[in-house]
Image: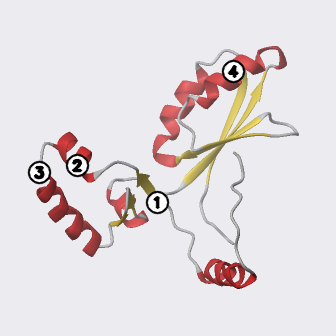
Amino acid sequence: MEKENIKVTEKQIQILKKFYENGENIQVCTVYKTQTSLAKELGITRQGLSNHLRKLRDSSLIRTGRGFIDLTSKALGILGESGIDAFVFMKVFPQKRVKAYEQIKKSGATKIYRVTGDVDIIAQVAQSKLDKFLKAVSEIDGVEETSAHIILETMV
């Protein structure tokens, strides 16, 4: 990912640091579609969608802004998306890495890390999608071994 060249003042950096120190790390799911296109997809009027969005926003289930809608962790909980992740450690046969890595990228992980050590890949996967991910990965030629670990508690 390319780093943006954004100019900020020392005071703005101080402000951002203070926000970060006092912030809460939450999981959100962001939708980047216009409300008009969402209304059309849902088969309701733009005004009808606007009424629903207001109620969802008042219930702290979504946040909205120009060009985006965030589902909050509270909304994800209602949908059965607990926000709890799992990590899947994978060993891949060296001769088959290139093709296996390409397929692993398409398997539905939130993030994928290529690492050094006893494993080749660590994939971060939503716990609710873990079974589907493991099934997809098990069918990839070259994946030698997998080990899944579900987060029980975030300690820091």
How far apart in space, not on screen, are marks 1 and 3 (Cα)? 26 Å
Q: Quadrant of residue 124?
A: top right
Which numbered disc flags the more N-terminal residue, 1 or 3?
1
Which comes sooner in the sequence, label 2 or label 1? 1
Looking at the rendered structure, the kind of residue marked 4 is: Ala
The residue under label 3 is 45
Residue 13 picture location, percent across and down: 71, 78
Q: Disc 1 marks which amino acid?
A: Val
Q: CA distance from mark 3 to mark 4?
A: 45 Å
Q: Earlier in the sequence, mark 4 or mark 2?
A: 2
| Picture disc at residue 100 | 4
Which residue is label 2 attached to?
Answer: 36
Say which amino acid is labelled 3: Thr
Residue 82, placed above or below residue 116? below
User: Which residue is rendered at x = 81% and y = 40% of the image?
Assistant: 115
Q: Which mark's residue is nearer the viewer, 4 or 2?
A: 2
- What residue sits right under mark 1 in the picture? 28
Left/right of residue 90 with respect to residue 59 in the rendered view: right
Of the numbered discs 1 and 4, the one sitting upstream in the chain is 1
Q: Residues within 10 Å of mark 1 (few under 14, many from 20)?
A: some
